[in-house]
Image: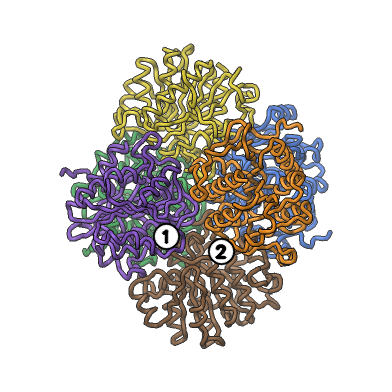
Chain colours: A brown, B purple, C green, D yellow, E orange, F blue
Amino acid sequence: MNTDNLFEKEGPIYLGSQLKKKNCSIGIVGVNYDGTTCYKPGTRFGPNAIRLASQCLETFCPKSGKDLDEIKYFDFGSVFLDHRDTISVIDKVKLATQYILINNLKPLILGGEHSITSGSIQALVDKYPNLILIQLDAHADLRNSYQNNRFSHACTIQRCTDILRDNKVFQIGIRSGTKEEFEIMNKRDQLIEFNPGDNGMLLKQKLEPFKDFPIYLTIDLDWFDPSMVPGTGTPEPGGLFWHDFETIIKKLDDFKVIGGDIVELSPDIDPSGVSSIVAAKVARSLIITLDKN
Amino acid sequence: MNTDNLFEKEGPIYLGSQLKKKNCSIGIVGVNYDGTTCYKPGTRFGPNAIRLASQCLETFCPKSGKDLDEIKYFDFGSVFLDHRDTISVIDKVKLATQYILINNLKPLILGGEHSITSGSIQALVDKYPNLILIQLDAHADLRNSYQNNRFSHACTIQRCTDILRDNKVFQIGIRSGTKEEFEIMNKRDQLIEFNPGDNGMLLKQKLEPFKDFPIYLTIDLDWFDPSMVPGTGTPEPGGLFWHDFETIIKKLDDFKVIGGDIVELSPDIDPSGVSSIVAAKVARSLIITLDKN
Amino acid sequence: MNTDNLFEKEGPIYLGSQLKKKNCSIGIVGVNYDGTTCYKPGTRFGPNAIRLASQCLETFCPKSGKDLDEIKYFDFGSVFLDHRDTISVIDKVKLATQYILINNLKPLILGGEHSITSGSIQALVDKYPNLILIQLDAHADLRNSYQNNRFSHACTIQRCTDILRDNKVFQIGIRSGTKEEFEIMNKRDQLIEFNPGDNGMLLKQKLEPFKDFPIYLTIDLDWFDPSMVPGTGTPEPGGLFWHDFETIIKKLDDFKVIGGDIVELSPDIDPSGVSSIVAAKVARSLIITLDKN
Amino acid sequence: MNTDNLFEKEGPIYLGSQLKKKNCSIGIVGVNYDGTTCYKPGTRFGPNAIRLASQCLETFCPKSGKDLDEIKYFDFGSVFLDHRDTISVIDKVKLATQYILINNLKPLILGGEHSITSGSIQALVDKYPNLILIQLDAHADLRNSYQNNRFSHACTIQRCTDILRDNKVFQIGIRSGTKEEFEIMNKRDQLIEFNPGDNGMLLKQKLEPFKDFPIYLTIDLDWFDPSMVPGTGTPEPGGLFWHDFETIIKKLDDFKVIGGDIVELSPDIDPSGVSSIVAAKVARSLIITLDKN
Amino acid sequence: MNTDNLFEKEGPIYLGSQLKKKNCSIGIVGVNYDGTTCYKPGTRFGPNAIRLASQCLETFCPKSGKDLDEIKYFDFGSVFLDHRDTISVIDKVKLATQYILINNLKPLILGGEHSITSGSIQALVDKYPNLILIQLDAHADLRNSYQNNRFSHACTIQRCTDILRDNKVFQIGIRSGTKEEFEIMNKRDQLIEFNPGDNGMLLKQKLEPFKDFPIYLTIDLDWFDPSMVPGTGTPEPGGLFWHDFETIIKKLDDFKVIGGDIVELSPDIDPSGVSSIVAAKVARSLIITLDKN
Amino acid sequence: MNTDNLFEKEGPIYLGSQLKKKNCSIGIVGVNYDGTTCYKPGTRFGPNAIRLASQCLETFCPKSGKDLDEIKYFDFGSVFLDHRDTISVIDKVKLATQYILINNLKPLILGGEHSITSGSIQALVDKYPNLILIQLDAHADLRNSYQNNRFSHACTIQRCTDILRDNKVFQIGIRSGTKEEFEIMNKRDQLIEFNPGDNGMLLKQKLEPFKDFPIYLTIDLDWFDPSMVPGTGTPEPGGLFWHDFETIIKKLDDFKVIGGDIVELSPDIDPSGVSSIVAAKVARSLIITLDKN
């Protein structure tokens, strides 16, 4: 695999990243892309904002009792994008994920918009044919095409479904979509309702049969209530809160999460910078979760 | 009725508005006024901000199962205001509401500050003598006069009470006011306490006797917690959340809402634009509620 | 020509626009597109920001002595974009410009990013084979391809040159580009140097031979110094000021400007809103200039 | 004169203000009013923003060689406004100015919007019957009525003219108005053209005959280019710069300035805070100018 | 005690502050210091932001039924800081607190960063040897040294502990710290867990044995969720909400709160100004609580 | 020299930086420090903001005809600061500069506040005993002590003078200071007046005798007018513009610039990001100037 120029070298890296990838368990990569964003663009600045904001976090996570200092992970920087059409970008994400897997690392992708998820899914499903996809999101993302683009971020879970075929997809807390998208979620029985304060038992029960399956967790930050993450391109009132995220991530302790992404942070929309800090803390949780498995 | 120049023609219109008012059930109108705002002004830009933000919403509402595509409503634009003193503006709102009623439409007013409500109440009470007023608000708005203006937005519910006489007024979740205002609310038994997470049964029970009464719903966006709607002129910490709004709007399903307003959005105070999106989504809910009845 | 759905109907319109296109001399159209923007996106919100900001302008222009009240122009709204790839968008701009020309109007295009200019040039050159292009810009925009996209906004003047063939192009005040781009400008003798406070005599002299030629004026707002227009995606320090713009527009009085565009306003980057007001005032000047000819 | 409750006591005061008014030569007063602002409101926060920003200035002014430490002035705080209609506010400004004059101080009024100027003019003309008015402004403010309010900030110089009768008014650098307003300025021969970099000789020459006349200087901050003062309600591109202000203030050295105001700062529009600092530095210049005479 | 120049005189004061300290029960003082802030600085502007924002509050508090109008308190302004190293500042806070106590007032300190708390604790423990410290905070602040500064705001509770020796410290709702800090809190049994919606019974039970002890309440505003208070230097997702604050303040009704501080507001980080309003409302609650005892 | 941990490794680097320092001619280093900032803090974020903003620049500079691609420079990252008191930080800057010199590179320091300059001067004067200092700044920075700190950024040129002894210091365009500071500048004949549009001949003439002297150029970004660089901690109206900077940098072509710094960028104060872009473009000019010599 020719990986010259696969990554940009000039950006910042995530707090506590090793400077060599040897002996690491997790590989972090950014994707500075927002080409299909339908309302407010700007997620291209998401990966570097997460990295810069990570500097204000403690390495210790009191909820899990784990410390980033005890985990080895390597931040490759952001994928170098020489083409800007959606398919080329998704191909690059696939290539980067393959490279991470070849290096025996678990991928953690920082977006950028949600369309990129199908790239990592393509790479992962080769290694993990029985891959399960779990999505935290405000939007269903199940359109077959949007603005005449089948690879729009509004279609990303449908594109992943095309790849995953009969593998299970779970969608948690979706609160926005077309009537058709809600019908699809119901028909496929893949929408797990989740309201603020829920205890996560329904999620646990639904996941039970998949105890030994590899899981990919895609986190669209607009899953959170816009009061927590205003810095996203299509904020949707009525979302979830930090304690809900902790409930879910705790439930996943007993499962085998082998990769994930954090997408749709658009940092400049939130001048307070809090959205980027939330994203950086989500990344800390995901690093800990990935390391456990 | 001479309605030449009643509306401005240069602004945007709400998502999915018909281009002719024929066959519509709802008439939308904006009021670009903030003349009595006591702390931070700027609600004059509220109506157009709601309209522009509406473009990022889905037309489908999963909570109600309804789609805006199935409803016909007409956005007249904003009332043309040639005078800027409070009484003249309220008169214009009255005139615009009358015009909407004459066209057999239910009025949905977009503010602008809260003082405008007494204008639509004046017009509506002629058609619906037994009109009930329900207010979602942080503030009681029951002062008799404020800064020597009896028509200040701090007096608007008192002015409505003057018009409604013995008709019932309900005030939901009020958390700020003078000692006198709280005494009035208690004396008139019209304050319905509502805390985050409440199930709305108290509201339902209080409303029960008014099953067949026409209801006007005035929504001051500062009812929401400032974390959700920072873009308002007098934000008051300790407010309600989106799920609480859904609880209330669901309870109103069994009642006859025949008009309403959404006021006090001051979009420039919130550079993230989330406040405007919340307001636009409240408008979507209100359109669906108005169409049901 | 099937023009159903050519324009969106829900947005605002420019100050003083007629409500019917009959008897107008100018047709305004917006293009909400920023798909190839290389640094900060957001010009998709440019056209509506210009329209809303126009409300704070006087209709009278003391420099020219003209009043918008004496001119009839029609704002069609923004082009409806069902595809978001650059070529499709440019085709739509071409179509919209053709429609404007068929209606016997002079086109004034509001961007949106600069890539759209080649669309209007395509339409205009059919009607005006000897069309001259004048560009106010910080950047040369003469790359043959950028990020593997030949239609990137960084290539737009080169694309126009492809269409215009041997017709003259003038580039005024360019201060950023690659070494190759500066060599091209020099070779083609089309860069007119312009520093703050210049009197415009060089411009006049260069234009002299083209007295009777139809001129298209494309104004990239980053031509202005970023202190005046911070709200643009690739601001370049060292730009020009309002008085310089007035100098140039005055010099064009004696020439035949038959169309133009105002591009690269990215309103959300400038929370003060001043950038949008500058753009709206540039539009006022351009309306007056177009009407003269 | 009953002056109980004439001033608010809770706000900040201007840098270096004495704590007693005894022995002072200048009296500063704020007017937190923006009731007739036609585009973006917010000048009610101007006076306190100027005071807080003054803390970052040096007391020494190298251009004049003067130091605020050598001047005694007293900041009364802002006028307490119990009524918010324009006429009541102007009356309060008149009352406050009279109080300042009775205390043998020269008034320096901090706005607030421009409508307040006629209040101080009313008070001053009683003391100085041959008062001359000099206005720095982007707008002519010569309308007779605006939005049906004869006391709108768009009419303020016309209202002052009503009071001053045949006394001379000079308007410097006006660049926006209706055709009628420009005709009036020309007819009355009171517009002094002033472009960036001008040397002020025309001003000096025009003022020459009024060497011994008392002068009131009203400074609307939108006279400055919006790049310098974006924080104002109706910014007008094409304005003047700091060096131009210095040119003018220097020319006034030989004249008898006995009062002045600084109006139309709307601090929240400019999140950088620079507009407030410009206003505070203008105030420093004006204090020095007032003290000289 | 030489108290000349102990306080700055030019800033604003808290809503309803008396103009003389005679007969008051509470003394308010600001500390404009942020010298050890590790991430985003700016808390130096906190005290004046709280005072200015207090103007938009009602004096009446419906939860407690109390009105500020019935309480006498005096705002001294901010401590004059001639040195800016941490130890000097803490000494000045100690001096100011002593001065307040000498005047028989209860101190309410407005920060500024958290490091200042040890200054007031030093002064108070002399008067109240059995002083109890209660901390609302996101961070443990128990490091012994941070960035080689033992008086960093990251060490403030450890410094207070040094002073308080065996007196009890309670830390409520801490959610961030090093592994060592969490071990210390556990070992000392001083961390009171508190999640959103908790009823406060655990707190009450823990406090029970200290019914008659004097209590100092230090409120780091980052205890609140960043959605409520984005305007703070090290926001930590997963915080508490206004209703939680009310729960706690209500539980303290039966205890003897004799002083307190409100720290870490960094107003410019939150352009909406809501963070300052939350802080001002917290101050209103604390004034009422202090007055009760 | 033990240089372990001299630099942070997690931040971004300047556009086009080599990945190894071998064969480079210039060494870039950041100093994330703002400990003595007297008004608005935040320059600690300056270095990384410059690096991130550099990504939007062209590598080619049309004024000089040079391209960054032809120059080799290495960005070490920011100095790791374990102590935060001014003297320790200045010592670290000295150490870092020494390390750069040992590697045979010319230092380019990115601030951070201005106090750091004396650190690099200390290191440089050992290598270049006849070092000349040229300062672009709004402020004289000649106080002997400020807020009881002799190393405050308000004293930095005085501290440099202490080190440089009788070596020449030139101060260009200073427009703010105490009376004493202006007297010192005059007495030492080191203030070179510079107004917008000046041609730089005076500067050239003053520098003439120092043709073969090594020059250090310290650029405080508040030298620019605040309209160009609002993102600085103590903006001073009446500054210079980009064309003035180009005039000066061009005049320095004939002189021997062997090091420099760019200080006082406080990026979060300017939400448009333009200030950071100006700073990044100044850095591009300085890299080219350093490479020439």
Chain letter of the residue beneath label 2 in the structure image: E
**Is A182 on the left or on the right of F281, as rendered?**
left
**Is A19 on the left or on the right of B238, as rendered?**
right
Q: Is residue B273 above or below residue D217?
A: below
Observer-nearest residue: D154 or E101?
Answer: E101
Q: Which mark is in front, 1 or 2?
A: 2
Residue depicted at 41% across the width and 65% down the height: B199
The kind of secondary structure element at disc 1 is: loop
Q: Which residue is mark 2?
A: E198
Observer-nearest residue: B161 or C265?
Answer: B161
Q: Is residue A200 visible?
A: yes
Same chain for marks 1 and 2? no
Q: Quadrant of the C terminus of chain D?
A: top right
Residue C287 in the image, given as x and y percentages of width and height: 31, 44
Residue depicted at 56% across the width and 39% down the height: E71
Identity, as a three-letter code, of the amino acid under mark 1:
Asp
Observer-nearest residue: E170 or F104?
Answer: E170
Chain letter of the residue beneath label 1 in the structure image: C
Q: Which residue is mark 1?
A: C34
Q: Residues within 10 Å of mark 2 (few under 14, many from 20)?
A: some
Res. A112 mark: none
Identity, as a three-letter code, of the amino acid under mark 2:
Asp
